[in-house]
Image: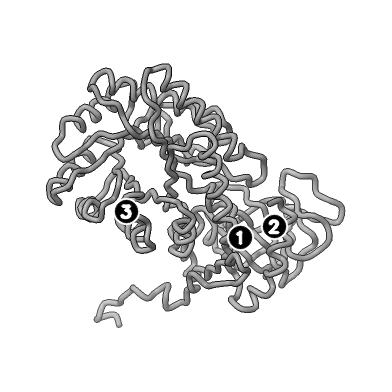
Amino acid sequence: MDLISRRDRIADRGPELLDEYGSPLYVYYESDLRENYRTLRNALDDHYPDSHVHFAVKACFEPGVLSVLRDAGCGAEAYANCELTAALDVGFDPGEILLTGMNRQPEDLERALSAGVGRFLVDNATELAKVADAADATGTEASVLVRANPAMEVPTHPGVATATRESKFGLDVESGRAMAVAREAAATEGVSLDGVQLHIGSQIKGIEPYGVAARETMTFAAEIRDELGIEIDVLDLGGGFPVPYDEDVPNSTDIIAHMADAVKTAAEGHGLPEPTLYLEPGRRLVGNAATLLATVGVVKETPHAEFAVLDAGTNAVSSYWPYPIYALHGEGDPVTASDPTPEGFREYHVAGPLCYTGDVLREDAPLPPLDRGDVIAVDRIGAYSLGSASNTNAEPKPPVVLIRENDEATVIREGESCSDVFGRSTVPDDLA
C-alpha cells in the first residue's frame, strides 16, 4: 500500500479513533499483518516449500498482534522468559516455537523443554551445556541449531548487523569455534544436533547478502557432514527482510527466490540433501502494520528551524529509522523527506515533548502548514516500537488499537495512567 493510500486510510478513521481513545494512539491493522505473512508464505511455497516461518517475537510481543500471526499460520521465534510466555499463552504450537537467546536461564530452558518447544538455538558453548543440563533435568532431548558467524559485510545500520566480525552473536567459523561447539553437541547426551543457523541482521538493503548467508551456512553444514558424519536437517537463515521507510527495498518474493536458489545450488555443490528452511522475520511482518497518531501542541519557529511539537516522541517509537510522517489534513500527496518539498508545504522538525534535545522524530519533514490540534501520522512503526517505548519524563505509554478485517476497532492494550507508571514503586516507611 502506497503512502497516499495509507494516509487516506488512517485519515478516514483517525479523528474518530482519537476522539474515542485519546492522543497519542498506536493503530495496528490486522489486514496488513495477514497480508505480510501471506505474501511471505506464498513466496516460499513457490520457491522453497519445505520451509517454516517463525515470527521474531522481539519485533512485537503484543499478544493481540501475536494472535493474528498465529491464526494466519505462523510459528514463533522467542527469547526465553516472557517472550516464551507470550508465545505459549496466545496458543502457538510449542513444536513450532524456536527458542533463541545467548544467555537463557536454566528454569526457562526446562520450562521450554517440558512444554515441547521444537528447536533450541545454541549461540555459545555455555548455552550448549545449559541446554544439555535442562534436557537431563526434564528427561527430554533437545533439538539444537548451532548459530554460526562467518564475519560477513552486512549492509545495514551497525546497531542491527549481527553476522559481522565485531558482533556478539554467533560462533566464529574461520577460527573453528563453531565446529568445536557442533562437535560437542554431537557428542552430548540429551542433545540432537539437527541444524545450523545464521542471522545477518535487520533491515538488510540488498538481496545478495541472503545468498552469501545461504552459501556460507551450507558450507559449514558440509564441514559438519565431513567431520562428524551428520547431515543437518534444518538450515535457519534468520530474518532481516526490510521495510520501505523512505526508500525502495527488495520485496519478499525476490529475496526468497534468490535465497532459495542459493540454498539449492549450494546443497547440490556440496552433495547435501536440501534441508528444511527456517526463517525468522520480524520487521517485515509487523513494521508496516502500525501507525502512531499524535497531535500537534506547539508550532515553534527558531532562527534555524521550525518545530512541530507533538504529544509523543522518541518515548513512543523505536530509534534508527526514517519513518514516513504525514499530516491528516491539507491538500497534496504525502511525501517522504527524500522527495522535493511540494509547493505550499513547509519543512518541520517533528519533535516530541520530552526534556532532551534528541527527542526529534524527523528533521525537515515536508508537511502542509501546521497548527495546534492538527493530527500527525508517524507511519510504519509496528516493529520494535512497543517494546522500546519508555516512560521518559514519567510519560504514560499510549493505548494500542487493532483495526480488525471487518473494520472494527478493538483495544488490545489499555493506555497507561500515572498510577501505572509508578504502580510498582514503594517508599521506605521512614520517608513516607
According to the picture, the residue beneath numbered tag 3 turns out to be 94
Which label belongs to residue 113? none
Is residue 129 in sight in this rendering?
yes
- Residue pointed to by mark 1: 291
Which amino acid type corresponds to the residue marked 3 in the rendered image? Pro
SS assignment at label 1:
strand
Q: Amino acid at mark 1?
A: Thr
Residue carrying label 2: 6
For the residues bearing labels 2 and 1, Cβ distance under 8 angstroms: yes
Q: CA distance from mark 2 to mark 3?
A: 35 Å
Identify the secondary structure beneath mark 3.
helix
- Between residue 195 and residue 239, name the one nearer to us: 195
Q: Position of residue 362 (x, y in %)?
A: 65, 52
Q: Is residue 361 left or right of residue 213?
A: right
| Residue 190 position within the rendered picture, expressed as x and y whole percent measured from the top left | 16, 40
- Examine the rendered structure and indicate whether residue 359 appears above or below residue 249: below
Q: Secondary structure at mark 2?
A: helix
Q: Residue at x 50, y 40 (%)?
A: 240
At label 2, which amino acid type do we have?
A: Arg
Callout 1 touching callout 3 (CB < 8 Å): no
Q: Is residue 388 left or right of residue 9?
A: left
Instruction: Count every numbered label the image shows and give the total.
Output: 3
- Residue 271 image-quadrant placement: top left
| Eye-nearest disc, 2 or 3 | 3
Closest to the observer, 356 or 18? 18
Q: In which quadrant is the C terminus drawn?
A: bottom left
Mark 2 crowd level (few <14, some 14–19, many ≥20, 10 Å Cα): some
Q: CA distance from mark 2 to mark 1?
A: 9 Å
Q: CA distance from mark 1 to mark 3?
A: 31 Å
Graded by Cα atoms within 10 Å as few (under 14), some (14 to 19) or many (20 or more), the crowding at tag 1 reads many
